[in-house]
Image (cartoon, rainbow, N blue to C red):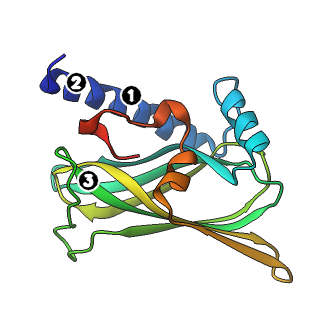
């Protein structure tokens, strides 16, 4: 398969996934369905704090406004208060690119809980995270999880690339060089 054909196929899949995501977003927090259940159960058994089913960048208009989107499940035994997810945008040849507005590369989105353990599929959408029409995908660089209540809290920060990759659901890991965002 040529890289152009692969790119088109990936773009169609990303578009369809985005439509499904937006439909679910309008419905609110989605239940953990049969598709997600085996991955969630494995993450719980392995002691991973959460599992991402999507962490990506989607160009949403002709000006290059790019949204950062995450879909995830809290697989820890504790309720999450805040989840901060940092990513950098990557172009089609695997290079980091900067936003053409503001010049920033890294973007951090914050999801505000509470997010109870294994309660459902959660979503974070941050429109206009970057402005650059060459963005192909987003690579996670940092995940910060704040657990607990105002009286007791625990913070876990993950920055190691292998540990971050372990948080991504196996079906979402892109192992081909041209799609090496996760």
Q: Are marks 1 and 3 in contact (CB under 8 Å)?
A: no
In this picture, residue 92 sits left or right of residue 76: left
Which quadrant does the N terminus fall into? top left
Asked whether 94 or 37 is in front, the reply is: 94
Q: Residue at x 18, y 59 (%)?
A: 132
Q: Which residue is mark 1?
A: 16
Check disc 2: other Cα within 10 Å, few if <14, some if 14-19, many if 20+: few
Residue 144 horizontal/vertical position (percent): 59, 68
Query: Residue at the right extreme?
Result: 151
Read off the residue under disc 3.
Answer: 90
Q: Name above or below for residue 175 compared with residue 129.
A: above
Of circles 1 and 3, the one toward us is: 3
Which one is earlier in the sequence, the residue at label 1 or at label 3?
1
* Residue 55 on image: x %, y %: 46, 48
- The x, y position of residue 68, in whole percent, is 40, 55
Looking at the rendered structure, the secondary structure element under dot 3 is: strand
Q: Callout 3 environment at 10 Å: few (<14), some (14 to 19), or many (20+)?
A: many
Give whichever of discs 2 and 1 has the lower sequence position.
2
Indicate the position of residue 116 as horizontal and vertical percent values: 79, 55
Q: Which residue is mark 2?
A: 6
């Amino acid at each position: 398969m040529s890289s152009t054909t692969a790119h088109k196929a990936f773009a169609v899949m990303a578009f369809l996934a985005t439509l499904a995501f937006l439909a679910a977003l309008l419905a609110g927090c989605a239940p953990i369905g049969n598709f997600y259940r085996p991955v969630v159960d494995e993450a719980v058994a392995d002691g991973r704090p959460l599992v991402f089913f999507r962490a990506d960048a989607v160009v949403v208009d002709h000006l290059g406004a790019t949204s950062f989107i995450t879909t995830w499940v809290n697989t820890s035994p504790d309720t999450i208060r805040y989840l901060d997810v940092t990513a950098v945008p990557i172009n089609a040849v695997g290079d980091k690119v900067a936003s053409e507005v503001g010049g920033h590369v890294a973007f951090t989105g914050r999801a505000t809980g509470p997010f109870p353990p294994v309660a459902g599929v959660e979503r974070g959408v941050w429109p206009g995270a970057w402005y650059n029409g060459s963005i192909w995908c987003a690579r996670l660089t940092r995940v910060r999880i704040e657990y607990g209540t105002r009286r007791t809290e625990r913070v876990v920060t993950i920055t190691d690339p292998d540990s971050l990759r372990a948080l991504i659901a196996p079906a979402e890991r892109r192992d081909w060089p041209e799609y090496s965002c996760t």
